[in-house]
Image (cartoon, rainbow, N blue to C red):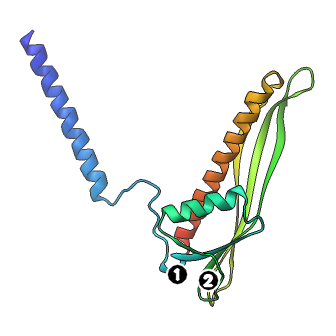
Amino acid sequence: MQRNSRFSLNKHSILLCLLTFSLLTLSSCGFHLRGDYLIAPELQTLSIRSTDRFGELTRVVKRHLVQHNIKIVESYKEDIAQLVILKDTLDRRTLSVFPNGQVAEYELTYTVHYQIKVKDKKPQSFKFEVNRDYQDDPDAALAKSRELSLMLREMRQEAADRILRNMASIEV
């Protein structure tokens, strides 16, 4: 009996050592969790313009920028970089139908077009899509409506994250 507990203790010690070694290796190689973006100094202060100034995507992007210590300037000045959200659209495509002909599943596609303008540089245009599958149930319309709104919110969050990632990859 004593031999099993000694083996168990050694096994736990080895696992603890391996875990510690793994964490030290990851931290020493420069690995860090996503969300800490290295954005060029020219993009640290931004003016944001949008076709829908009070739209959900614009609010989410502003919130993400502020969370990452990017200063947002309300009035446009020529020497300040500008993020222009040109268009965001949501499309849906039928993936499957029930035997009675009602739609069972959709594919939602959220498309975002935007530009980044920096002084004395040509504007850089970007476009990307965020896709999700959505199962529809006519018997639970209220619950599905709530699920759809949550999914749209999640898609906008992902779109804002992608805009920040793209900004981090821009060489100014």
State which quarter of the image contains the C terminus.
Answer: bottom right
Q: Are marks 2 and 1 in contact (CB under 8 Å)?
A: yes
Q: Residue at point 59% right, 84% down?
A: 80
Give the image quarter of residue 54: bottom right
Q: Residue at point 76% right, 34% down?
A: 145
How many labels were placed on the picture? 2
Identify the amino acid type marked 1.
Glu
> How would you rate the neighbour count of disc 2 (Cα within 10 Å): few for under 14, some for 14-19, many for 20 or more?
some
Q: Which x, y percent locates residue 75?
A: 65, 80
Location of mark 2 (residue):
118
In this view, the residue in front, 50 or 13, is 50
- Of all residues shown, which one is farthest toward the bottom? 120
CA distance separating discs 2 and 1: 8 Å
Q: Which x, y percent locates residue 167?
A: 56, 69
State which quarter of the image contains the N terminus.
Answer: top left
- Of all residues shown, which one is farthest toward the right? 101
The correct choice, above or below, for 154 with respect to 163 in the image is above
Q: Residue at point 60% right, 80% down?
A: 81
- Dot 2 lies on which element? loop
Dot 2 or dot 1, earlier in sequence: 1
Location of mark 1 (residue):
42
- Dot 1 lies on which element? helix
Q: Residue at point 49% right, 76% down?
A: 40
In this view, the residue in front, 32 or 152, is 152
**Do we see residue 110 in this rendering?**
yes
**Do we see residue 171 in this rendering?**
no
